[in-house]
Amino acid sequence: MAVDDMPVPTPPVSSARPGTLQRVDDWVEERLGWHQLAGVLLHVRVPIRAKTFFFGGITLFLFGVQIATGTLLALYYKPTPEAAYDSVIFITSDLDFGWLIRSVHHWAANLMILFLVLHMIRIFFQAAYKYPRELTWIVGMGLLGVTMLFGFTGYLLPWDQRAYWATVVGTEIAGGIPIIGDFALEVLRGGADVTEATLSRFFGIHVLVLPLMLGAIVAVHLVFVHQQGLADPKEADPRPPAVPTGRTKPFFPNYILEEVIAWLFLLAILVVMASIWPAGLEEEANPLVTPEHTKPEWYFLGVYELLKHIPIKVVGILTPVVFLAILALLPFLDRNPEIRARKRPVAIFLGIVTIAVLIGLTIWGYVS
Amino acid sequence: MRIPTDARRRLRRARLILLGAPIVLVALLVGGSPAAAQDPEPTPSLIPGPPAPTPIAHPGGSGDNQCAACHVSLDDKQQAITQAWQEGIHGKGGIGCADCHGGDPRSDQITVAMSEEAGFIGIPSRDDTVGICGSCHSDPERMGQYGLPTDQYSKYWTSVHGQRLLEADDTKVAICIDCHGSHAVKKASDPTSDVYPLNVPQLCSRCHSDPTLMESYGIPTDQYATYEQSVHGQALIGNQDVRAPSCTSCHGSHAAQPPRSSEVVDVCGKCHTATQDLYLESRHAELETAAPKCWTCHGTHDVAKSSEALFFHPEDDPPDYECTTCHEPPDMTLKLNVEQFDNEADRRCDTCHHPESLIYPQVEAIAGALAGASSAQETAAEKVERARSLGMLVDDAENALAEALTAYVQGQAAVHTTLLTTISGHTDESVAKANRAEELAQGKLDESDFRRMAMIVVIGLLLANVVILYYVLRRIEHGQDQGQDAEPSP
């Protein structure tokens, strides 16, 4: 890690008497010694050749958007089958800017998964999961899992037909896991069927358990990234660790400013999506009327399509589980220390095939 | 065993009595539409049917059936008959071969089991078959355990089929086995049965769509094809909706006959009860036989979805006004020429109520009231759809629109009263609800416009921020370049 010794910018002092800001800063510094902390956190350097495309930072930004909009939604949302649907209508139709908050929450959830996956793909092709970042990759897989759980639990909350039946099907799939299937189904649903118990536990998990989990895992992920610095896509990290030799630039303010510009673009995209395609709502959930077509959200469509075509149910359910396990253990399975794409043709080929298959299955699931 | 001698004698006597009866009566009974039955109609005197014979008596009990043991291993035909019987309701219920064919079911010897001494009658004649079925099925004691009615036999003799059999000994008419089958009799509630409600139109059409068979009766053969296209046919055949009427719903089954003109309102009213009540409030109902009935406007087998088109002929194709359409010479009393309404294009109010008539303005006002409500709904529906396509939640507008439709449908039904005030009460309510729906939808459209405008402003602000931050970044980088900040790290 490279700590820059550049001083924290201070406001210009125009007179002998220090400005209010300076005085507050001095007051805090005297008590906390926070300049050192800020220095450790912010004044690191990143390789000039690092190409992050800001995918990870954007995912983090979207998590922040979800916390902000989710908190506002939770103020009005009522997690009972009798009131949930009406409260969502109230938020969307009657509450001032409720439509905006709900639609931004809806789209940010989708974009968060999209950017998380893009971030993973970037890490894979730049081989940034290799030494010394194996643990960061595994923690990142945890983030993927928790984010998918966010999507799964949040999907039920509007309590419309699509939400209800997607949850019925989703939990049914979990129930097909060998040995623990019945137990998993019971735990997820809080009983034999998707009922009030399911709604209240999905709500609790969505607004309490998962945010705390994601927050904690993100913190660990960021600490790891901070300790290791950003990977240089052209040159493997020296082993044993040594100070990198490539050209660098300051993380603060250069990289942070670039990141914030990317965030502002994302915010603009969110506003456009929320304004042009506001979050909709189907008929209220009715356990007695099964809709003709029940499909999960796009990020589960690949698995959904896969399950349809694998005749043995257990194999169908275990396939994505095994795939995720292989993905999580990738840094230990791929022992090739090389990071340049040309020197790792098998990994690149398998990566492209995997992405193509996933996209293919998703499109197939969408049109079928 | 055969039908008892006294019953056969009565049957023969009945045939003799009516041997010279006018053919008109037959035509009246088998006529395809109520139009064939002119009012006032003479109530046709029915030939009484014979009393139900006693069931065939044979030795042995219900468990004895050696017949099947041999017949199942005879030729393919006999094997098929035996299997059909075994799978049918009679085979399962212990009704054996001898119960219909006579003979001794205890014996497996052909000379004993199928001997005249044992009362073997072979294949019953079509004449006798009705009596054989009726002998058990009209017996309340036997049928009680199955919860079956016992009036089929007596009803059959009142039907056009039964009357024709009595009157002309015409064995081509439908008898029990033509609809229910002989050996493979199934419950009417069994979906694979020919008499299951969804299968009834096909069943009747087997004979009634056969021009050769129907020719001698002078009955048209297009009823099935017409019915299939009607709202009733589409619901029953197309949507497999057992609630929809089949042939038997209007004509009866065992007592099948065309409804007489005076009965039509009650026949349709069996299902359309509310509409019947409204019709009975109308001036049309007061005029009784002189005025239109359900079929005058809606047709018979070809009932179509009613619409505002039923009010007037198209402007470019006005009706040919004839006094005799509504007035009967020589004294020109009020009476519909019912045959004119066989033509679908003439099933319109202005076929009778011509533009110079006193009633015409009222017909116009009723049509106008419905058209106004209809148009208000269309306008509202178009806006609701537009708002929905923009992603807006339109539940409240849809609810108002559904209420508008309800009031409109009530208005449509109220047309049967012919009372303008009653109809416009509903259509005014429909217009008010449609206007409310339009107002709500317009609110959503305005909201959507606002969102898009606000979006442009917000995007502008965000981009301004991007530009400023980019400028700041460049300034910082410039400063760093000056200070040789981008040096390799130490």
Image (cartoon, rainbow, N blue to C red):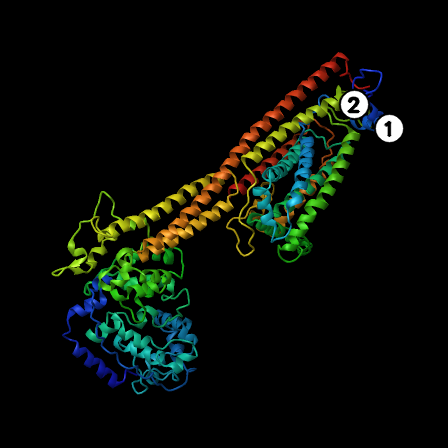
Image quadrant where one finds the C terminus of chain B:
top right
x, y percent for residue A192: 64, 58
Asked if the residue under mark 1 is in contact with the one under mark 2, i.e. CB atoms within 8 Å, the reply is no
Say what secondary structure mark 2 lies in. loop
Residue kind at label 2, given as amino acid type: Pro
- Residue at x 62% of width, y 55% of height: A195
Q: Which residue is mark 2?
A: A244
Q: Which residue is mark 1?
A: A33
Q: Outermost residue, left direction?
A: B330
Q: On what subunit does the disc labeled 2 rest?
A: A
Q: Position of residue B103 (x, y in %)?
A: 34, 83
Please name whichever residue, B302 or B431, is drawn nearer the observer in this view of the structure: B431
Please identify the quarter of the rendering in which residue A93 is found: top right
Figure quadrant of residue A243? top right
- The CA span between labels 2 and 1 is 29 Å
Q: Is residue B2 left or right of residue A16?
A: left
Q: A241 or A216: which is nearer to us?
A: A216
* Circle 1 residues within 10 Å: few <14, some 14–19, many ≥20: few
Q: Tell which tag, 2 or 1, sits nearer the viewer.
A: 1
Q: Is residue A46 visible?
A: no
Q: Nearer the viewer, residue B293 or B127?
A: B293
